[in-house]
Structure formats: structure tokens, C-alpha cells
Amino acid sequence: GTGVLSAVLARRGVQRVVATDQDPRALACARENLQRLGLTGRVELQQQDLFPEGKAPLVVCNPPWLPARASSPIERAVYDEGSGMLRGFLAGLAAHLEPGGEGWLILSDLAEHLQLRTREQLLEWIAQGGLKVLGRQDVKPRHGKSADASDALHAARAAEVTSLWRLGLACSGWRLGRRPGHVLGPLAWQPLLHALATGLGPLGARQLRHFLQQRFAHV
């Protein structure tokens, strides 16, 4: 909706980003934000249902976090009825990954704490999509409501964790990196997760920037 994911990736060194949304107003908002940031030459916006055509070495998705019905268009940023977008991403990701590619799913577990979805369901959808979990990085919320005991959802918000799930093809035996057996450690993923969870804040992660430039410079 805002284009924050595409802006973060472009700023961290990805040379070409294709960003999608179904809502023309969301695309207009993203276009305006990218213009302000001077990134329109690096990010292509498309009106699509999830995936654009073709394959990529990196596919990033941040679906709405709560599987409930939206009562207005703007609420679709929060509510994903029947987990439709989440399930669609997991079901279609394998067909859009290049060999050795990864899918990054940014998802809060708030729905689990509200008993709207279980962790077992999520893992089952990942497996059904022909995917496996390569790793996961977690961050705790920093917003005011997570510490507000008077909030009706305080218990769930206080326990909430936002995760970056690194997903790959289940049948693939590769490991991420340019050298055989080379795997980037948690310090390479944590700054991006914080940026995606909090918006376009300072990253200051040379290791992550170097990785994105080396691995995805041709995207």
C-alpha cells in the first residue's frame, strides 16, 4: 500500500524491484512515496494479484496480519479474510522463485495469540506450497499499545512477535551465498526485519547491503 518494502529493498542495493498491489489507490500512494524518495527509476509498480509474471531470486510479502473480513477498503491493510493473501503467496511462491531463490514472509503472530490462526496451520501451508523454512528472525513490538495495560488486546499485543520467515524450495539442497556452504548469520537479516517492521528507519547494516548488492544486483 505505501511501497515501504520496495523502498527498503531499493535503498539497500537491489537494482530492480517490481512491486504489486490490486488497489489503484494503494499504487498511487506507493508511487507518490517513491517519487519523494527518488526511487521511481528503481521500482516498477504493477497492478497485480500477488505475483507479477516471471521468476525472481527474491520475493518479499507482508500480508495483512489478521484473518478477518474488512469493512472498508482501507481495512484490507489489516484484515485478510480467510488468510487468502497469505495462503495465495505460499501456494504460488515456488512457481515464481529462481533456482536458489528465497521468499521472505513478514508476518506477525498476533492472529495466533487471538486464536484466529495456529502456528500448525501456517507450517502446513508452507509445506503444501512445496516450501521449507530456511530460517526465521524475530522482533518484539515497540509501539505504545504493546505496553498499554488498558488496551483490550494488551495480552496479545504484549506477547506479539513479528517474524521474517526465509522460505526456499523444499526439493532444493542449496544454501544461500556465493560460496558453497556460505550462510549469512542473523546480523545480516535483523536490520532488514527491523526496517520492515518499523518503516523506513535507519538500517546501518553494511553486511546486509553488501549481500543484497552481490546476490541481487541483476534483479
Image: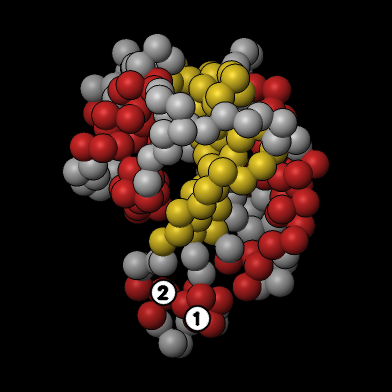
Q: Quadrant of the C terminus?
A: top left
Name the residue beneath numbered marker 2.
Answer: 145
- Residue at 77% x, 51% y: name it: 124
- Residue at 51% x, 69% y: name it: 160
Q: Amino acid at mark 2?
A: Lys
Tell me: 65 left or right of 117. left
**Number of residues whose C-alpha sits closer than 10 Å to that of mark 1, classed few (under 14), some (14–19) or many (20 or more):** some
Residue 7 visible within the image: no
The circle drawn on residue 154 is 1
Q: Secondary structure at mark 1?
A: helix
Q: Amino acid at mark 1?
A: His
The one of 184 and 200 positioned closer to us in this rendering: 184
**Residue 142 location, x and y as percent?**
34, 67
- Residue at 27% x, 32% y: name it: 209
67 is higher (above) or lower (below) than 184: below
**Residue 90 location, x and y as percent?**
69, 39
Mark 2 to mark 1 CA distance (whole Å): 7 Å
